[in-house]
Image (tube, rainbow, N blue to C red):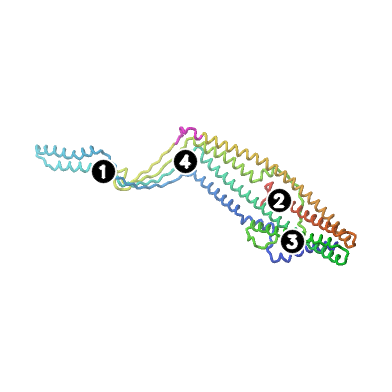
Amino acid sequence: MRKILTGLTFIIFCLPFGEVQAQRILTLDSCRQMALRNNKQLGISRLKQETAKNIRKSARTKYLPHVNAIGGYMYTSRPVSILSNDQMTMLNATGALVSGGVQSIGNILQTSPAIGNLLTNISDQLTAAFDTDTRHVMVGSVTLLQPLFMGGSIIAMNKMADISERIAANTFDATEQATLYNIDIAYWQVVSLRHKKLLAESYLEVVKKLASDVSKMIDEGVATKSQGLSVDVKVNEAEMNVTKVTDGLVLSKMLLCQLCGIPLSEKIVLEDETKAELGIEMQQGNPNVEAALANRPELQMLENVVELGHQGTNVLKAGNLPQVLLTGGYMVSNPSLVNGFRRRFEGMWNAGVMLRIPLWNWGDVRYKVRAAKSSTAIARLELEEAREKVELQVNQVAFKVDESNKKLAMARANIKRAEENLRTANLGFKEGVIQVSTVMEAQTAWLQAKSQEIDAEIDVKLSQVEMRKALGELRN
């Protein structure tokens, strides 16, 4: 029996090394690093962090003065007239009337008629001076606005930007933990299937050896064909199991490659595949609910949402408060507005304070504030519910860890009994005191016990991973 077990060990754990040399060997840590580098959701989370960072920087600029430059050109079909048409007519006639009166006086006083011509010229110049020539208007200005008091909306918006940045960071943390959890699950799934494949192959060799022995016994007349057919059925079942586990292993490796961001067709071998013993260390479940509540990024995001709702309410409340801004700037126009509408660019400085006081908005702001408070209350209830679920999850995972430890201990004890049973059956079969069916039952029991041991070891490892994730400690 010892020779048989030694042969099985050689088959299971020595033959794969020849294949490993031509393949890429990956450790759990290297798989994690590749997954973190290539995961698309992590890339999205990084971009969201960068977006939140820039939004926060943008919110800081609301404290600072803003300077704007404005320019424009306008053509009108008629110029702006300072005097009415009747006034313009009277102004034109004034020169003629004064000229006639002066001419009459000149005849009496024998003075020169040049005075009348001078007055007429003055009247014409006045009429021309009142022509604004504003059909072509060009205007430009530089304006400065400095918020002095905006009802607390700028402060609230900056706090919201800070909270949004923390939400982005917590989202990244949650995505990173989910990525590590998925890669760990996929990694140990491959390891489990690899060991099961080696187990199935070794079992197939044992069954084939039994079939060969029974065939010889049939030839010698000490065994029946019925016994030989029973063994052949077992051989077929073993071959089918090898095919199933091989296909499952290929698919599991493809999933692992996809998570790591490497080509699906690349040949990989995991470090733990080549180990004769997985070296699983049992750990007691640690239902540390306080640590989970403090570390879980999902809870932190919900807390951020509550804070965000509170600051959003403050922004809405600012709509009912007065707003004060300091204004200043320089305006230039052509035609000039400061020196008789001359066709040249001239301007002037200005400075002032602008006050905006909301008087009546039909309760618009009040309704919005009430809606925001309701949304915040909903977020607070969701946070409390999430905390309760996390507490339940931590205790369930702790129980699962302890349960997997018990299963592993029982599986290892069953292995010893199954090996002893198989040894006894083989000895009895050689001595001719035990039937072939009894040997096959012993082989099947050994196979099941070994398979259960592999499952129990992987369950222990996965439950430990789940425990770390439940506590928010699954980090790179």
Query: Which of pointers 2 and 1 lies earlier in the amino acid sequence?
Result: 1
**Residue type at the position of mark 4:** Pro
- Check the image and report above or below for 288 versus 1: above
Which residue, given by chain and number where applicable, does mark 1 sit on? 131
Classify the position of the N terminus by image quarter.
Answer: bottom right
Judged by depth in the image, the label closer to the viewer, 2 or 1, is: 2
Callout 2 touching callout 4 (CB < 8 Å): no
Q: How many marks?
A: 4
Q: Residue 274, labelled with which disc?
A: 3
Query: Which of pointers 2 and 3 lies earlier in the amino acid sequence?
Result: 3
Q: Residues within 10 Å of mark 2 (few under 14, many from 20)?
A: many
Judged by depth in the image, the label closer to the viewer, 2 or 4, is: 2
- In percent of the image, x 27 and y 41: which residue is there? 81
Residue 58 in the figure: left or right of residue 446: left
Judged by depth in the image, the label closer to the viewer, 1 or 4, is: 1
Callout 1 touching callout 4 (CB < 8 Å): no
Judged by depth in the image, the label closer to the viewer, 3 or 4, is: 3
- In percent of the image, x 81 and y 57: which residue is there? 444
Q: CA distance from mark 3 to mark 1?
A: 100 Å
Assign a secondary structure to mark 1.
Answer: loop
Which residue, given by chain and number where applicable, does mark 4 sit on? 147
Query: Which of pointers 1 and 4 lies earlier in the amino acid sequence?
Result: 1
Query: Which of pointers 3 and 1 lies earlier in the amino acid sequence?
Result: 1
**Residue type at the position of mark 3:** Thr
The magenta stretch is 356-365
Res 34 visible = no
